[in-house]
Image: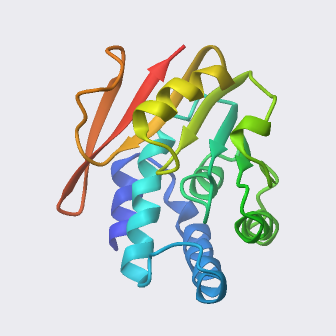
Amino acid sequence: MNELEQTLERLAIDRSVAGRLWNFVELFEKWNASINLSAASTRAELVEHVIDSLHVTRHLRDRMRVLDVGSGGGFPVVVAAICLPASTFTSLEPVHKKHAFLRTAARELALPNLSAFARRLDDHDVRDYDAATSRATFDLREWLERGLAFVAPSGVVVGFEAIPRSDLPPTVERHPYALGDKQRAIVLVRR
């Protein structure tokens, strides 16, 4: 069993999605070679991004409508859409070539639950999502504060913490995990 399958098992994600995740990796590699979706330059780095993104899925399982901001090359939104087909994902990515990739990924990976828009957060007027995520788009504190404006009451804002921060809101929930030899955390703020 490879590291991706081990992570799926550890996170109680149906291992049947592994094939679709590998299809995403292959599609990403093809596009990244010509339009630079990410600094990930090796298959191992790319798989690490997928594994990192898998850690957010447990926090989105009961969230039907999810906003992902600064979706870039699809981390975590494409991974989450593959793993959580009952949820709908709205992806905001203002860079047109990355937006084109997200639309292609939704089509080629048969993800009817993923809609990608070429717009910035400030230009998005829907404010009643069950959850909002962003990975490395804003400063983490800024994202947790801004994201609250886009979720409904009882909604959750989700971020990725690479280095422990002491300046986050006092109500933040941390869910630590290991990513290889690095410690990470999914951080949540509830509205």
Furthest-top residue in view? Answer: 153
Image quadrant assignment for residue 165: top left
Please state which of residues 189 and 118 is positioned toward the viewer in this rendering. Answer: 118
Please state which of residues 22 and 69 is positioned toward the viewer in this rendering. Answer: 69
The quarter of the picture where the C terminus appears is top right
The quarter of the picture where the N terminus appears is bottom left
Furthest-left residue in view? Answer: 181
Up the image or down, 163 lies above or below 39; here it is above
Image quadrant assignment for residue 24: bottom right
- Count of labels in the image: 0
The residue under the point 73% across, 68% down is 105
Residue 86 seen in render: no
Give the percent coordinates (x, y) of residue 49: 43, 64
Report the side of 172 relative to 21 (left or right): left
Report the side of 49 relative to 73 (left or right): left
The residue under the point 17% across, 62% down is 181
Tell me, what colour scheme is on the image? Answer: rainbow
Up the image or down, 71 lies above or below 60; here it is below
Up the image or down, 17 lies above or below 184; here it is below
Residue 170 seen in render: yes
The residue under the point 45% across, 38% down is 159
Give the percent coordinates (x, y) of residue 151: 65, 22
Give the percent coordinates (x, y) of residue 106: 77, 62
